[in-house]
Image (cartoon, rainbow, N blue to C red):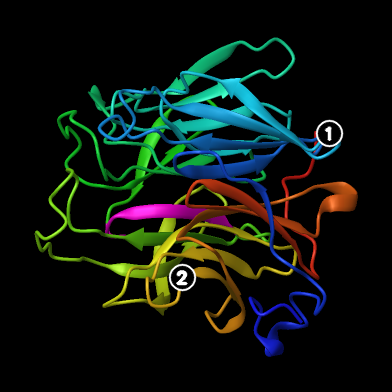
Amino acid sequence: MSETIDSYAAAIIPKESELEVIYDNAHFTEGPTVAPDNTVYFSDITFTHQTDMQAGHIMNYDPKSDETTVFRSPSGMSNGMKFDTQGRLVIAEGADFGGRRITRTDMKTGKSEIIAALYQGRPFNSPNDLTIDEQGRIYFTDPRYIGHEPIEQPVMGVYRIDMDGSVHLVIADSGKPNGIAVSPDQKTLYVGSNDSGSFRELPEDMPTYTGRMALRAYDLSAEGTLTYRETLVDYAPEHGPDGFEVDVEGNLYVAVRDKTRFGVCVYASDGKELAYIKTPDLPTNVAFGRGDSSKILYITAGGGLYRIRVSIDGYHLPRK
């Protein structure tokens, strides 16, 4: 068995599975998502103060050729991304000279449209991650971790974009929301809070107050409204969850940035830990392959993209 996998996790991760590096030449990888043809897209976030003002990139990994290339640059400082039921790429664009908006790209034509850029006439803080329910509604988190832009929203919240294009603030009590996912039965919205205590680049020796570090569950109604139900995992005083996904059985695969035990933690829907995958660097997000590759879990961590085979199929929106 690989040393990166705890022995009790065999029901979730096959004993012979090994974490494989696919690409390791990025600055800071995020937001992996898998297209209908199993091509993997992921963000390379190029913090401008660290990269001589590089403008962010969306990368493309082709499992058939085993090649990684630039799909789009500049990226609008893309972060989380998802494919909708029509195969369009929906992107959360952040701050630090990024778009601070949600866009959608038609992969056949290459053309993009802005589907949310303002709430009550003011720009978002820094859209971070998103998920889509089976009715086509988009839910996205809007924290701020970095960027020179003024913060114009009164809360770091979770928003819903309806099919008519209207935007609604649906959660204001989650802390500093980051990762987000809808359960396969469409009855729960999971939100991860990772409150680093700042939204500016600070000296390494300057202390900050760390806020909520938790994985929280909200009851999701058929109308798209949300009610807080419970905290599944409380990571305090360590750092908590970044991005995550769910499998078809409703288990959560969470990128946990706890420096004392970082990696991908797999939880049952009640928060019980089922498995743990150690990653070479602090992880940021995960995504499942499709079809014959639906048991492949892609992981972004540090400046790399990784993959590992798991035992349960990943959940994807039904195709239209």
Left or right: residue 310 compared with residue 58: right
Q: Residues within 10 Å of mark 2 (few under 14, many from 20)?
A: many
Q: Which mark is residue 181?
A: none
Q: Which mark is residue 262?
A: 2
Q: Residue at x 18, y 44 (%)?
A: 201
- Percent x, y for residue 297? 70, 57
The residue closer to the viewer here, 262 or 235, is 262
The residue closer to the viewer here, 24 or 184, is 24
Label 1, on which residue? 65
Q: Residue at x 87, y 48 (%)?
A: 291
Work out whether 161 lies above or below 278.
above
- Percent x, y for residue 217? 46, 67
For label 2, the SS is loop
Q: Earlier in the sequence, mark 1 or mark 2?
A: 1
Q: Residue at x 70, y 63 (%)?
A: 247
Residue with the most extreme bottom position: 8
Which segment did they paint magenta?
173-182
